[in-house]
Amino acid sequence: MKLKPEVNPSALRPELLLALVIAERIFQEFNYDFVVTSLNDSIHSDTSLHYAGAAVDLRTRHMKDDKHIVTEKIRSSLTKDYDVILELDHIHIEYQPRR
């Protein structure tokens, strides 16, 4: 796992740590470097779960056409309490428990 220098891992929720471990394993299956580009740092919307330590962004610019497959494999490996979204240049994962 690589972190961009400005990524701040403080106050990370344990549930998100689990998602990171699972996502890293899947990236390794596909032979991709696993780079965290944002945790509770950077600039996000005011209501972003990044600030609560419950969201992470993973770099995808180095991935080929299978980034959709990687994203779906991450999504299916986590519970319904996680949202996994393929954005233009990253995979966004957030922990948002459903009641």
Image (cartoon, rainbow, N blue to C red):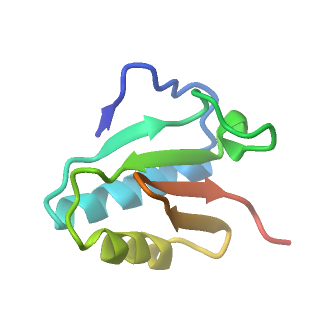
94 on left or right of 68 = right
Is 2 in front, or is 12? 2
Q: Quadrant of the image for the C terminus?
A: bottom right
9 left or right of 30? Answer: right
Q: Quadrant of residue 11?
A: top right
Residue 82 image position (x, y, % from top left): 62, 65
- How many callouts does the rendering have? 0
* Residue that extends furthest to the left in the rendered view of this protein: 31
Q: Is residue 58 above or below residue 42?
A: below
Q: Is residue 98 left or right of residue 49?
A: right
Q: Residue furthest right?
A: 99
Q: Judge by depth and name the residue closer to the eye, 24 or 44.
A: 44
Q: Which residue shows up at 20% across the image and 59% down it?
A: 28
What x and y, as percent, mark residue 57? 48, 46
For this orientation, the residue located farthest to the front is: 88
Residue 15, position as x, y percentages in the image: 60, 52
In the rendered image, residue 59, in percent from the top left (x then y), is placed at: 35, 47
Q: Is residue 52 above or below residue 86?
A: above
Point 72% across, 38% down: residue:
52
Q: Which residue is found at the position 47% from the left and 26% from the top?
A: 7
Name the image quarter holding residue 23: bottom left
Quarter of the rendering occupied by the N terminus: top left
For the residue pair 78 and 85, the one nearer the viewer reads as 85
